[in-house]
Structures are given as structure tokens and as C-alpha cells.
Amino acid sequence: MNSNISCRNVILIVITLVSSFIMAQAQEGEFKYGTRIGLGESQLSFSDISGESNKLALSIGIASAYQFNDIIGVSADFLFTSKGGKRDGVETTSSALGFNQEYEYTDKYRLFYAELPLALTLRVPLKENFYLRGFGGPSINFKVLGTEDRLFEDDNFNDRDGYSKRSLEDLETVDYSYFYGVGVEVVGNDGRSYLLDFRLNQALGTAGEINNTEVKNSYFLISASCLF
């Protein structure tokens, strides 16, 4: 609870500072908006075991940026991001004769979020209309969907005890993370900006529980966007 409260406070402080800065510089800046798409790798970590589970991550949505001057700016996006992971386990059952039998299975988790990442950006001009960019900030993430599949190696046992697309009810509705990265920006003769960046998103707290185990989300993306 205290962790969630502190995360909310950090988000509110950042939003307030960014909003104040934009209002103070509004007469001098340049606003652009467009689309963003990213492809990478999602990692789902469990609190009761070491290591992480990987899955393809896909992100798509609306991007916006406000440039105060040639170097300093801010960005705010609204993205839909697919992430998740998988985990192997063993289920033990007792037979009618009193013997224990083990059945190996694989759980696959599909998570879908609406994300609002806010960032401070810094640009370094390398040559005319070509910039090196660095950025970072908080992200507010809203759970849209979470499902789980369980597949047993034993086909007979799987027909009886396996399942598909079971809803994950114990995930937080809202969680918080931070992200950072580097990239390049090219400004065309028509004023449009074309961006390519590498970004890492890390959890500020748990995303909730899966099968009574706390989990955290993180992902790495190669992201491209066009702003006009």
C-alpha cells in the first residue's frame, strides 16, 4: 500500500512539474503529434523464483512531443502494449492406490495494457536536422486484459485439467513504471520528425498476483514514430 502511494506521489509531482514548465514556455515551443509502434521483448518476473520469463512485446498508439527549444522537450504518449510470459510447473496428484503422480505443465500469460508514458527529452544536434535523443520518465499503466493458458504434457491429464484463456483476476487495475532510452531524430523538409529509439520500461511496484505469486512487468522495445 505504501509503495503504491509513493508511486502515485511521484507521478503527480512529475505531471505537475511538466505542466508548469509547458505553461511557462508555451509561447516559444513547438508541438507535434503522430503515431508510434514498437516491437521487442517482455519479461515477467515472479517473486518466488529467480529469473524471468520472456515473451514478444508489441506496442502501438499515439505519440506527442513538445519542444521548448532545440535541445529540451517533453513527450506524452497513449499506447496499447501487449506483454506477458510463461512458467513451467508440476502438479502432484494421488492415485486410488495412494501413490503420488506428477504431471508437468506450462503456463502462458497474456497481458494487455493501456499505457501513458511521460518523458523529459534532451536532443543533441549532430548535424542539420539530425539529432541524438535521450529521454526518461514515469508511466501510468492501466490493465485492459489478462489471461492464462495451462498446457500439461500428458494429453489425457490435459484434457481433464488443462485450460485456455482463464482470466487473471488478481492483477492490479493500475500499476506504475519508469522508462528511459536513447534514439535518433530526423526532421524532414516538410517539418515532420521521424524517430527511432531503444527504450526500457521497468516496474516501480508489483503488477499484482498470478496464482498467489507477486509478479512484475518489464520490457524492451525498438520503437519508431512519425510526428507532424
Image (cartoon, rainbow, N blue to C red):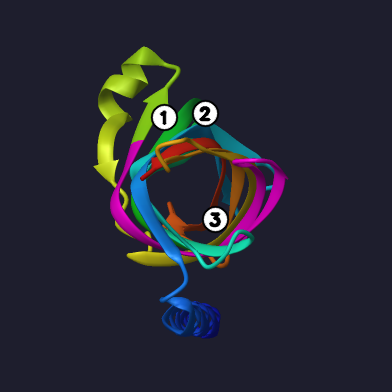
Q: Nearer the viewer, mark 3 or mark 2?
A: 3
On the picture, is 212 further left or further right than 160?
right
| 136 in the magenta segment | yes
Q: Position of residue 173 (x, y in %)?
A: 32, 65
Q: Which residue is mark 1?
A: 95
Identified at 48% across, 78% down, the residue is: 25
Q: Main secondary structure of the magenta part?
A: strand
Say which quarter of the image contains residue 135: bottom right
Q: Position of residue 148 (x, y in %)?
A: 35, 39
Q: Residues within 10 Å of mark 1 (few under 14, many from 20)?
A: few
141 in the magenta segment:
yes
User: Does the image show residue 30?
Assistant: yes
Question: Circle 3 sits on which residue?
Answer: 216
Badge 1 or badge 2: first in the primary sequence: 1
Labelled disc at residue 15: none
Q: CA distance from mark 1 to mark 3?
A: 36 Å
Distance from the alpha carbon under mark 3 to that under mark 2: 28 Å
SS at circle 3: strand
Which x, y percent locates residue 100? 51, 32
Give, as a single range, the part of the protein colored magenta. 120-148
> Label 2 neighbourhood size at 10 Å, few (<14), some (14-19), many (20+)?
few
Residue lying furthest top = 155
* Residue type for callout 2: Glu
Determine whether label 1 and label 2 are within 8 Å by CB. Answer: no
Give the quarter of the image for residue 216: bottom right
